[in-house]
Amino acid sequence: MVPKPEAHYFLEEVEIVLDRLAQSTRTMREIGDLDKGQLRIACMPAASGFFLPRVLANFVESRPHVTASLVTRTSYIVEELIASQQYDIGLSETPHARDTIGVTSFDLKCVCAVHRDHPLSAKTMITPRDLDGLPIAALTRDHPISIKTKRAFEDAGANLFQRFELQIFQPALELVEGQLCHCICDPISAESYKIYRPENPKIIFVPFSPAIEISTSILTPSQRPKSLLGVAFEEQIVAAMKGLQSQ
């Protein structure tokens, strides 16, 4: 058999189709193995600096072809981004129930951040009485943690001296490092500090009583199917959040 010129022309066309089919087969396999795809993530400021990037880094470490977009927004905006079905997953303060959002909530207990050289760092539990009249760094006075902290001090008959009022806890921890104050903060901020200060930390995080809880949620869009990649990443965040709860 001797191929005619038309056969050679047809062979070129067929090779293109076969190469495309092979590429499609590889892509389908990579998608099935969660080795390819894109994640769109929205996150509140407290977790976007170190905590969630660490979770993301662990997730994509063995997936070199996975891309990700991570935006930092207030909890309210994170909620709206997920409700609009634009993003795969979000992490925020727990919102009110909505049909457009799936919510997995975690109640996290706040801890007291004290400088390692302060006598309070040796305690196994810190109470409002221990902080009576001492300088405190806290969030804005209308934030749930600030409201609950104020109530705890009032119930104990202790004086709450809020020397610093801030938007997030990260700068508050810098002030604690400078021995200018103490801080009752959420465990995500505490974990973030441990991530960016793994060696020679200057802050000790001590349990606080009475318990001050903050509700944090993983948000997902409920009006469209979840991607396989999004489901796998959600499982990773759930595991990280459960780790905070166990601590």
Image (spheres, rainbow, N blue to C red):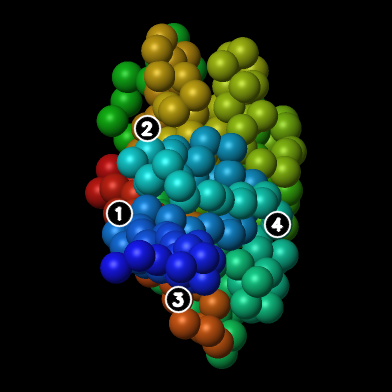
Q: Does label 1 or label 3 sit earlier along the sequence? A: 3
Answer whether labels 1 and 3 touch (C-beta < 8 Å): no
Q: Which residue is labeled 2 in the image? A: 206
Image coordinates for residue 9, horizontal then vertical, percent:
53, 66
In front of the other: 96 or 232: 232
In front of the other: 91 or 226: 226
The mark lying in front, picked from 1 and 4, is: 1
Q: Does label 4 or label 2 sit earlier along the sequence? A: 4
Tell me if residue 242 comes above or below residue 29 in the rendering.
Answer: above
Q: Does label 3 or label 2 sit earlier along the sequence? A: 2
For the question of whether residue 160 can be seen, the reply is no
- Distance between the Cα atoms at labels 1 and 3? 18 Å
Image coordinates for residue 132, horizontal then vertical, percent:
54, 33
The mark lying in front, picked from 2 and 1, is: 1
Residue at the extreme left? 246
The mark lying in front, picked from 4 and 3, is: 3
Q: Does label 2 or label 1 sit earlier along the sequence? A: 2
Residue 239 circle label: 1
Q: Residues within 10 Å of mark 4 (few under 14, many from 20)?
A: some
For the residue marked with disc 1, what is the amino acid? Ala
Give the SS element for disc 4: loop
- Distance between the Cα atoms at labels 2 and 1? 23 Å
